[in-house]
Amino acid sequence: MPIKFPFTKNKKQPVPQTVGLDYNQLPEHVAIIMDGNGRWAKNRGMPRIAGHKEGMNVVKKIVSHASGIGVKVLTLYAFSTENWKRPKNEVEFLMKLPVDFLNTYLPELIEKNVQVRTIGDFDVLPPHTQKAVDEAIERTKHNDGLILNFALNYGSRFEMVNAVKQIAAKVEDGELTSCDITEDLFSSQLYTSDLIEPDLLIRTSGEQRLSNFLLWQLAYAEFWFTEVYWPDFDESHFEKALYDYQNRKRRYGGV
Ligand code: FPP
């Protein structure tokens, strides 16, 4: 599919325009598993953290683009509950990335009317990570453009077990009976309770698995995989995913 560069609507920031992509029919919520940073770095003889740093720059590009074309929610898997198993220096670096990202990019997020949020077990993150993210959440809470939702120390099974515990506690208290337990009630106990469900899941780097990401919320999402490593991912890949999404038929189990 031909892609024209650049699109001249915004002179400061050329964006691609994918022929055939209907900007009025975009998926409202796009979730991304940003994978391949380590391999990208290794292929260049660089340390893994160099891949994460480059990955952070790609986050800026894709956030900017998603916001510019009118995507409503972008959920990015930045750190999973399993990522603590990585070497200490890598974990430390990943925990500093949101700080660097927000130090350098928060003014632009504010200017773009982006609202920052997180999902995940936030309270156990290092204080400096919490502080930077809290500040971004606070300073963007009234913005009503793109919701930029970082999954930080996120694990879907942990999230669902917590939801079950919260519901069980309400049943024990006599606030609910088992008959009150519905899909909507369960959804209301998840981190994503006030978000629409993802329409599209993108995973980079050739891996085709969910890795404990939004297992409940992705029930009806379209999946899009690419061999491209996250640090090489750009606006044209993002738009290709949106274009392919628009050419799928979503039936939600119907005919
Ligand atoms: C997976 O690649 C990537 C991560 C675990 C981290 C993703 C984080 C970023 C892209 C930057 C986030 C930016 C902000 C602002 C929070 P991998 O390391 O597993 O790659 P590999 O499979 O090639 O080893």
Image: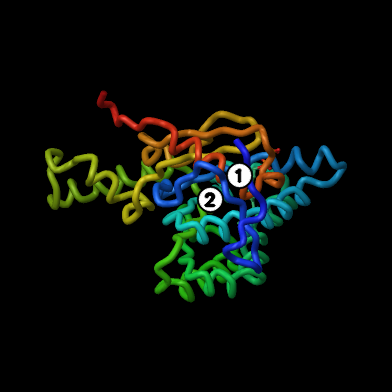
- List x then y, in percent, for residue 88: 72, 50
Q: Quadrant of residue 72?
A: bottom left
Q: Crowding near pointer 2: few (<14 within 10 Å), some, many (20+)?
A: many
Q: Nearer the viewer, residue 160 or 29?
A: 29
Q: Residue at x 53, y 53 (%)?
A: 152
For label 2, being within 8 Å of ligand 1 is answered yes
Identify the residue under disc 1: 34
Q: Residue at x 17, y 52 (%)?
A: 173
Q: Is residue 64 above or below residue 228?
A: below
Q: Nearer the viewer, residue 202 or 209?
A: 202
Check disc 2 and report its element: helix, strand or loop: strand
**Amino acid identity at mark 2:** Leu
Q: Is residue 157 visible?
A: no
Q: Earlier in the sequence, mark 1 or mark 2?
A: 1
Q: Is residue 68 visible?
A: yes
Q: CA distance from mark 1 to mark 2?
A: 7 Å
Q: Nearer the viewer, residue 114 or 190?
A: 114
Q: Is there a contact, CB below 8 Å, between mark 1 and mark 2?
A: yes
Q: Residue at x 61, y 57 (%)?
A: 7
- List x then y, in percent, for residue 110: 52, 73
For label 1, being within 8 Å of ligand 1 is answered yes
- Colour scheme shown: rainbow
Check disc 1 and report its element: helix, strand or loop: loop
Horizontal side, residue 53 vs residue 191: left or right: right
Q: Residue at x 57, y 38 (%)?
A: 203
Mark seen at residue 156: none
